[in-house]
Amino acid sequence: KIIKAPILEEFVKNTNFITVGKNGIFTTLKSCCDYIKNNNIYGSTVLVQPGVYNLVTEFGNDYLNNITSDGLYVGNDTHFIFTEGALVTFIYDGTNPKAAEHFAPFNIYGSCTLENLNVEVTNARYCIHEDVPTTSTEPYFYVVKYINCSMKHNGATVSTGTHSGYACIGAGTNKNTVSIIDGGIYNGNWTADISYHNYNGAAPSKVILNNVYMEHGLRLYDYGNSNVDVTISNCHMPSLTGTYTKFNITFYNNTCKIKMQINEKGGKPQKAS
Protein backbone atom coordinates (compact mmCIF):
# COMPACT_ATOMS: atom_id res chain seq x y z
CA LYS A 1 0.00 0.00 0.00
CA ILE A 2 0.98 3.68 -0.28
CA ILE A 3 1.81 5.35 3.01
CA LYS A 4 0.64 8.95 3.49
CA ALA A 5 -0.13 9.53 -0.18
CA PRO A 6 -0.50 13.35 -0.07
CA ILE A 7 2.88 13.70 1.62
CA LEU A 8 4.34 11.22 -0.86
CA GLU A 9 3.20 13.22 -3.87
CA GLU A 10 4.83 16.38 -2.53
CA PHE A 11 7.97 14.48 -1.48
CA VAL A 12 8.44 12.80 -4.85
CA LYS A 13 7.79 16.07 -6.66
CA ASN A 14 10.49 17.86 -4.67
CA THR A 15 13.11 15.14 -4.24
CA ASN A 16 12.46 12.33 -6.76
CA PHE A 17 13.49 9.90 -4.01
CA ILE A 18 11.40 6.87 -3.03
CA THR A 19 12.00 4.10 -0.51
CA VAL A 20 10.59 0.57 -0.59
CA GLY A 21 10.57 -1.81 2.36
CA LYS A 22 9.23 -2.42 5.82
CA ASN A 23 10.01 1.15 6.82
CA GLY A 24 9.70 2.65 3.36
CA ILE A 25 7.19 4.93 1.70
CA PHE A 26 6.00 1.81 -0.12
CA THR A 27 5.99 -1.63 1.44
CA THR A 28 5.97 -3.58 -1.84
CA LEU A 29 7.70 -3.27 -5.19
CA LYS A 30 4.38 -3.60 -6.99
CA SER A 31 2.81 -0.62 -5.24
CA CYS A 32 5.90 1.46 -6.01
CA CYS A 33 6.03 0.52 -9.70
CA ASP A 34 2.27 1.01 -10.09
CA TYR A 35 2.52 4.47 -8.54
CA ILE A 36 5.37 5.52 -10.85
CA LYS A 37 3.50 4.26 -13.91
CA ASN A 38 0.04 5.57 -13.06
CA ASN A 39 1.25 9.02 -12.03
CA ASN A 40 3.83 9.48 -14.82
CA ILE A 41 6.69 9.96 -12.35
CA TYR A 42 10.00 10.45 -14.18
CA GLY A 43 13.61 10.46 -13.00
CA SER A 44 13.10 8.96 -9.54
CA THR A 45 15.67 7.08 -7.49
CA VAL A 46 14.13 4.11 -5.68
CA LEU A 47 16.03 2.68 -2.71
CA VAL A 48 14.93 -0.89 -1.96
CA GLN A 49 15.58 -1.79 1.66
CA PRO A 50 16.74 -5.24 2.91
CA GLY A 51 14.07 -7.93 2.88
CA VAL A 52 12.48 -10.59 0.69
CA TYR A 53 10.09 -9.22 -1.95
CA ASN A 54 7.90 -12.17 -2.89
CA LEU A 55 6.15 -11.30 -6.14
CA VAL A 56 3.86 -14.32 -5.94
CA THR A 57 2.44 -12.73 -2.80
CA GLU A 58 2.50 -9.19 -4.19
CA PHE A 59 0.56 -10.09 -7.35
CA GLY A 60 -1.66 -12.72 -5.73
CA ASN A 61 -3.09 -16.01 -6.91
CA ASP A 62 -6.11 -14.45 -8.61
CA TYR A 63 -3.79 -12.59 -10.98
CA LEU A 64 -1.35 -15.44 -11.51
CA ASN A 65 -4.00 -18.10 -12.08
CA ASN A 66 -5.47 -16.01 -14.90
CA ILE A 67 -2.32 -14.29 -16.14
CA THR A 68 -2.06 -13.04 -19.71
CA SER A 69 0.49 -10.26 -19.26
CA ASP A 70 3.67 -9.14 -17.51
CA GLY A 71 4.90 -8.35 -14.02
CA LEU A 72 6.35 -5.08 -12.72
CA TYR A 73 6.42 -2.03 -15.00
CA VAL A 74 9.89 -0.43 -15.12
CA GLY A 75 10.81 2.66 -17.13
CA ASN A 76 10.37 6.43 -16.81
CA ASP A 77 14.13 6.99 -16.23
CA THR A 78 13.80 5.31 -12.83
CA HIS A 79 16.95 4.20 -11.00
CA PHE A 80 16.37 1.25 -8.66
CA ILE A 81 19.11 0.63 -6.08
CA PHE A 82 18.76 -2.62 -4.14
CA THR A 83 20.56 -2.60 -0.81
CA GLU A 84 22.47 -5.58 0.55
CA GLY A 85 19.98 -8.11 1.87
CA ALA A 86 17.24 -7.25 -0.63
CA LEU A 87 16.05 -10.33 -2.54
CA VAL A 88 13.29 -10.45 -5.17
CA THR A 89 11.66 -13.84 -5.73
CA PHE A 90 9.04 -15.31 -8.01
CA ILE A 91 8.79 -18.98 -7.05
CA TYR A 92 5.43 -19.91 -8.55
CA ASP A 93 4.17 -23.36 -7.55
CA GLY A 94 0.74 -23.11 -9.15
CA THR A 95 -0.49 -24.98 -12.20
CA ASN A 96 -1.21 -22.17 -14.69
CA PRO A 97 1.25 -22.62 -17.62
CA LYS A 98 0.64 -19.01 -18.69
CA ALA A 99 2.85 -17.87 -15.81
CA ALA A 100 5.90 -19.43 -17.45
CA GLU A 101 4.82 -18.09 -20.86
CA HIS A 102 4.10 -14.47 -19.91
CA PHE A 103 5.33 -13.43 -16.48
CA ALA A 104 8.69 -11.76 -15.87
CA PRO A 105 9.27 -9.98 -12.55
CA PHE A 106 10.70 -6.89 -14.26
CA ASN A 107 9.42 -5.62 -17.62
CA ILE A 108 11.43 -2.83 -19.22
CA TYR A 109 9.36 -0.24 -21.09
CA GLY A 110 11.82 2.67 -21.22
CA SER A 111 15.05 4.11 -19.87
CA CYS A 112 15.94 2.82 -16.41
CA THR A 113 18.69 1.41 -14.20
CA LEU A 114 18.55 -1.71 -12.03
CA GLU A 115 21.50 -1.72 -9.65
CA ASN A 116 22.52 -4.54 -7.28
CA LEU A 117 19.34 -6.48 -8.08
CA ASN A 118 19.28 -10.01 -6.65
CA VAL A 119 16.42 -12.01 -8.18
CA GLU A 120 15.48 -15.70 -8.39
CA VAL A 121 12.57 -17.16 -10.34
CA THR A 122 10.82 -20.47 -11.04
CA ASN A 123 8.01 -20.88 -13.58
CA ALA A 124 8.54 -17.45 -15.10
CA ARG A 125 9.36 -16.46 -18.66
CA TYR A 126 12.50 -14.49 -17.72
CA CYS A 127 13.87 -12.61 -14.74
CA ILE A 128 13.89 -9.50 -16.97
CA HIS A 129 11.85 -8.91 -20.11
CA GLU A 130 13.29 -5.91 -21.96
CA ASP A 131 11.05 -4.74 -24.78
CA VAL A 132 10.90 -0.95 -24.98
CA PRO A 133 8.35 0.81 -27.22
CA THR A 134 8.89 1.97 -30.80
CA THR A 135 7.64 5.52 -30.30
CA SER A 136 10.99 7.09 -31.22
CA THR A 137 12.86 6.91 -34.53
CA GLU A 138 15.99 8.42 -32.94
CA PRO A 139 18.94 6.05 -32.64
CA TYR A 140 19.85 5.23 -29.02
CA PHE A 141 16.85 7.04 -27.56
CA TYR A 142 16.44 4.69 -24.60
CA VAL A 143 19.21 3.66 -22.19
CA VAL A 144 18.71 0.57 -20.03
CA LYS A 145 21.36 -0.38 -17.47
CA TYR A 146 21.89 -3.45 -15.29
CA ILE A 147 24.67 -2.83 -12.77
CA ASN A 148 26.16 -5.62 -10.61
CA CYS A 149 23.01 -7.71 -10.66
CA SER A 150 22.62 -11.38 -9.72
CA MET A 151 19.93 -13.32 -11.56
CA LYS A 152 18.97 -16.98 -11.33
CA HIS A 153 16.30 -18.81 -13.34
CA ASN A 154 15.39 -22.29 -12.11
CA GLY A 155 13.32 -23.18 -15.18
CA ALA A 156 9.73 -24.36 -15.34
CA THR A 157 7.85 -27.32 -13.93
CA VAL A 158 4.54 -26.60 -15.68
CA SER A 159 3.76 -27.03 -19.38
CA THR A 160 4.53 -23.76 -21.15
CA GLY A 161 3.23 -24.17 -24.68
CA THR A 162 5.39 -22.27 -27.17
CA HIS A 163 7.89 -20.75 -24.73
CA SER A 164 10.74 -22.88 -23.44
CA GLY A 165 13.86 -20.67 -23.23
CA TYR A 166 14.45 -19.65 -19.63
CA ALA A 167 17.08 -16.92 -19.84
CA CYS A 168 17.70 -14.40 -17.08
CA ILE A 169 17.32 -11.52 -19.55
CA GLY A 170 15.19 -11.84 -22.67
CA ALA A 171 15.34 -8.70 -24.77
CA GLY A 172 14.14 -7.32 -28.06
CA THR A 173 16.63 -4.70 -29.11
CA ASN A 174 16.86 -2.38 -32.15
CA LYS A 175 14.06 -0.27 -30.76
CA ASN A 176 16.32 2.75 -30.38
CA THR A 177 17.93 1.28 -27.29
CA VAL A 178 21.33 1.11 -25.64
CA SER A 179 21.28 -1.90 -23.33
CA ILE A 180 24.19 -2.04 -20.88
CA ILE A 181 25.04 -4.95 -18.58
CA ASP A 182 27.90 -3.93 -16.29
CA GLY A 183 29.07 -6.58 -13.84
CA GLY A 184 26.98 -9.29 -12.28
CA ILE A 185 26.27 -13.03 -12.36
CA TYR A 186 23.67 -14.63 -14.64
CA ASN A 187 22.57 -18.24 -14.32
CA GLY A 188 19.66 -19.24 -16.54
CA ASN A 189 18.03 -22.59 -17.16
CA TRP A 190 18.78 -22.72 -20.86
CA THR A 191 21.68 -22.79 -23.33
CA ALA A 192 21.97 -19.01 -22.80
CA ASP A 193 21.66 -16.84 -19.70
CA ILE A 194 21.14 -13.63 -21.70
CA SER A 195 19.29 -13.40 -25.02
CA TYR A 196 18.84 -10.48 -27.45
CA HIS A 197 17.00 -10.35 -30.77
CA ASN A 198 16.51 -7.54 -33.28
CA TYR A 199 13.44 -6.24 -35.14
CA ASN A 200 12.44 -5.21 -38.64
CA GLY A 201 12.97 -1.61 -39.68
CA ALA A 202 13.96 -0.25 -36.29
CA ALA A 203 16.70 2.30 -35.68
CA PRO A 204 20.20 0.99 -34.87
CA SER A 205 20.76 -0.06 -31.28
CA LYS A 206 23.63 -1.12 -29.06
CA VAL A 207 24.29 -3.87 -26.54
CA ILE A 208 27.26 -3.53 -24.19
CA LEU A 209 28.38 -6.28 -21.81
CA ASN A 210 31.32 -5.65 -19.48
CA ASN A 211 32.68 -7.77 -16.64
CA VAL A 212 29.70 -10.14 -16.78
CA TYR A 213 29.77 -13.77 -15.62
CA MET A 214 27.44 -16.01 -17.65
CA GLU A 215 27.04 -19.59 -16.49
CA HIS A 216 26.00 -20.86 -19.94
CA GLY A 217 26.45 -18.07 -22.45
CA LEU A 218 24.89 -15.43 -24.69
CA ARG A 219 22.31 -15.82 -27.47
CA LEU A 220 21.87 -13.35 -30.33
CA TYR A 221 19.10 -13.87 -32.85
CA ASP A 222 18.02 -12.31 -36.16
CA TYR A 223 14.31 -11.83 -35.54
CA GLY A 224 14.33 -8.94 -38.05
CA ASN A 225 16.61 -7.03 -40.42
CA SER A 226 17.86 -4.09 -38.35
CA ASN A 227 21.44 -3.74 -37.13
CA VAL A 228 22.80 -4.07 -33.62
CA ASP A 229 26.30 -3.14 -32.43
CA VAL A 230 27.45 -5.48 -29.65
CA THR A 231 30.54 -5.00 -27.48
CA ILE A 232 31.58 -7.79 -25.11
CA SER A 233 34.53 -7.13 -22.82
CA ASN A 234 36.08 -8.79 -19.76
CA CYS A 235 33.28 -11.37 -19.65
CA HIS A 236 33.07 -15.06 -18.86
CA MET A 237 30.98 -16.42 -21.73
CA PRO A 238 31.09 -20.20 -22.31
CA SER A 239 29.18 -19.99 -25.59
CA LEU A 240 27.65 -17.70 -28.18
CA THR A 241 24.60 -19.18 -29.92
CA GLY A 242 21.93 -18.12 -32.39
CA THR A 243 21.81 -16.72 -35.92
CA TYR A 244 23.18 -13.18 -35.76
CA THR A 245 24.13 -11.87 -39.20
CA LYS A 246 22.77 -8.41 -38.30
CA PHE A 247 24.81 -8.18 -35.10
CA ASN A 248 28.18 -6.45 -35.41
CA ILE A 249 30.16 -8.01 -32.55
CA THR A 250 33.40 -6.79 -30.99
CA PHE A 251 35.23 -8.75 -28.29
CA TYR A 252 37.89 -7.69 -25.76
CA ASN A 253 39.65 -9.77 -23.09
CA ASN A 254 36.99 -12.42 -22.61
CA THR A 255 37.29 -15.95 -21.29
CA CYS A 256 35.33 -18.86 -22.69
CA LYS A 257 35.24 -22.62 -22.92
CA ILE A 258 35.90 -24.86 -25.92
CA LYS A 259 32.37 -24.40 -27.28
CA MET A 260 33.42 -21.17 -28.94
CA GLN A 261 36.78 -19.71 -29.85
CA ILE A 262 36.55 -15.92 -29.67
CA ASN A 263 38.50 -13.64 -31.96
CA GLU A 264 39.78 -11.00 -29.51
CA LYS A 265 40.54 -8.59 -32.37
CA GLY A 266 36.86 -8.20 -33.12
CA GLY A 267 34.46 -9.50 -35.71
CA LYS A 268 32.45 -12.68 -35.68
CA PRO A 269 33.55 -15.47 -33.34
CA GLN A 270 34.88 -18.56 -35.06
CA LYS A 271 33.63 -22.00 -34.21
CA ALA A 272 36.09 -24.13 -32.34
CA SER A 273 37.61 -26.92 -34.36
Image (tube, rainbow, N blue to C red):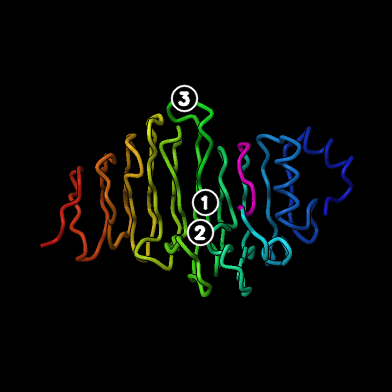
Q: What's the residue at 67%, 61% (across, down)?
A: 66
Q: Earlier in the sequence, mark 3 or mark 1?
A: 1
The image shows residue 116 at horizontal and vertical percentages of 55, 56
Is residue 262 at all visible to an observer of this figure? yes
In the current view of this chain or complex, which residue is farthest to the top?
138
Residue 185 in view, yes or no: no
Q: What main secondary structure does the magenta stretch of the protein show?
A: loop
Residue sitting nearer the eye, 33 or 86: 33
Tell me whether circle 1 and circle 2 mark residues in contact (CB < 8 Å): yes
Q: What is the total number of numbered labels drawn onto the structure image?
A: 3
The residue carrying mark 1 is 129
Q: Nearer the viewer, residue 79 or 163?
A: 163
Kindly identify the amino acid type of the residue bearing the numbered disc 2. Tyr
**What distance separates the C-alpha of mark 3 from that of mark 2?**
27 Å
Query: Which residue bears the numbered disc 2?
Result: 126
Residue 47, position as x, y percentages in the image? 68, 50
- The region drawn magenta spans 69-77
